[in-house]
Amino acid sequence: MLIEPLFSFADSQPDEIAVVDDRGQVTHAQLAALAVEWSRRIADLTDRPVVGLLAPSSSTYVAAFFAIWLAGKVVVPINFLLGDDALRHIVADSGIDLVLTVGPLANRIVAMGARIVDLAQLPPAPPSPTDAPSIPSVRPDDLAVLMYTSGTAGRPKGVRLSHGNLAADVDACIQRAALQHQHRFLGVVPLFHSFGMTAMMLAPVRLGAPMIYQSRFSAVAALNAIRDHHVSLMFAVPSMFAAIAHLKNARREDFSSIYAMISGGEPQSHALRQTFAERFGVTLYEGYGMTETSPVVALNVPHDHRPGSVGRPVPGAVARIVDDAGAHLPPDHIGEIQLAGPMVTSGYHNLPAETAAAFTPDGFLKTGDLGRLDADGYLHITGRIKEMIIVAGEKASPREIEEILLRHPDIADAAVVGRPDPHRGESIVAFVIPHPDAAPAPAALRDFCRDQGLAPWKCPREVRVVADLPRSPTGKVLKRILNERLEHEPKE
């Protein structure tokens, strides 16, 4: 399914560049040779069906990922930015006893009961595979990746993604976005994240397209990579695009090679889209997905997009909107988004009750996201069910309020949460990051929300100007942390 292209391009275009990373570049033939050599070592070292992978985005990561598959094993990507408790849970819950890693990252795993292979210490592979690899025969339902969620709400959960799930999503993304072999991918979202894995590794490997990786995101380095490598495709989260937009030396001509810049992971603001369009002449497209859907299920693309939406569902994905009772809603009615299709997980590892609760009787995944489908089939995300704020019996969507705040010229980013209020149920608290040299007054920001037509009960009761917001490794704002801060504050 997804293994064969690695070797077909190593055979047909052995000397073409496959990966450029912080350490240099490797060809298709070299990448395939590494995968073959390391797969043999894996097979000799463990009898267990799962192998951990703990490494930054690089040619090493890609080769190790495919080596695990070549050895007939399941990949467990490990987020190296997690704390020790979360890492310990992943090691125990997945059942891995072997982790492929590099350098200092190895020290964190040794104390957790798993053995390591430090890939940086292995001898170099030959310039190409010494003989034809034995590619394991896999069925669509065979488990391919055990992808642990980031743990924004408790311990990380292992999402079971099959070879069929991943192949279906890769093919759907390629078809929907009209991706080509000649495209050059810039990978800034970590490969241990489902977005990075599919969009920045599996899709380009399928196409034989070159991948340019950064081990850690830097707006300056990303802009340099776009210039130097004539990048045509970049997938990132909005905060990464915002960092690039703030670079004073970024010019319109720097983006002349771009085919598409696509964001996901969190809402993309109108202000950010407008900045890219006016300053660089680039349209930022938005997509939608989750780890449980491999992850992409909807996507705006150059030939078919609607600003403010996350696009139409990719081929094979089915989205529907339901009310609180589970009844289907007509176009332009807001309700829970439910998803089905060949890219949707079969469930969570070792969590049968949570798996059962996550699906409807007819097999649709309950996303917990609120949204609507318009009459033309474009999906619009309006918020999270659990994040809805109830003010005196009325529902307020944090996303709507954040979008208003981001219209203010002094505001770079915003996050809105609710805090318990003995009189109103909840009150609205906004955390805002100002642009450099700006000093917005909280009272003025509340007035701005009212002037923009926001209903009085939706206007933040409190606005806090902060230097930063708590974020996941991919830049997503962790509202749980903001809620915890408010919860532990002294009561007035």
Image (tube, rainbow, N blue to C red):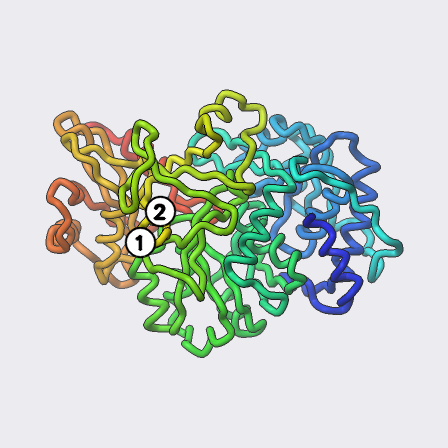
Q: On the picture, is 188 further left or further right than 310?
A: right
Residue neighbourhood size for the residue with mark 1, other residues' Cα within 10 Å, grouped as few (<14), some (14–19), many (≥20): many
Q: Are marks 1 and 2 in contact (CB under 8 Å)?
A: yes
Disc 1 residue type? Asp
Residue behind mark 2? 469
Please tell me whether mark 1 or mark 2 is closer to you in this view.
1
Residue behind mark 1? 413
Please determine whether, in this image, residue 190 is positioned above or below residue 21.
above
Q: Quadrant of residue 439?
A: bottom left
Disc 2 residue type? Leu
Q: On the picture, is 393 further left or further right than 128?
A: left
Q: Quadrant of the C terminus?
A: top left
Does dot 1 land on a helix, a strand or a loop?
A: strand
Q: On the picture, is 489 further left or further right than 378?
A: left
Is residue 255 in sight in this rendering? yes
Which residue is at a point 83% across and 43% down the rendered structure image? 40
Between marks 1 and 2, how big is the CA–CA gap?
9 Å
**Residue 327 image offset from top left, x and y in percent:** 32, 31
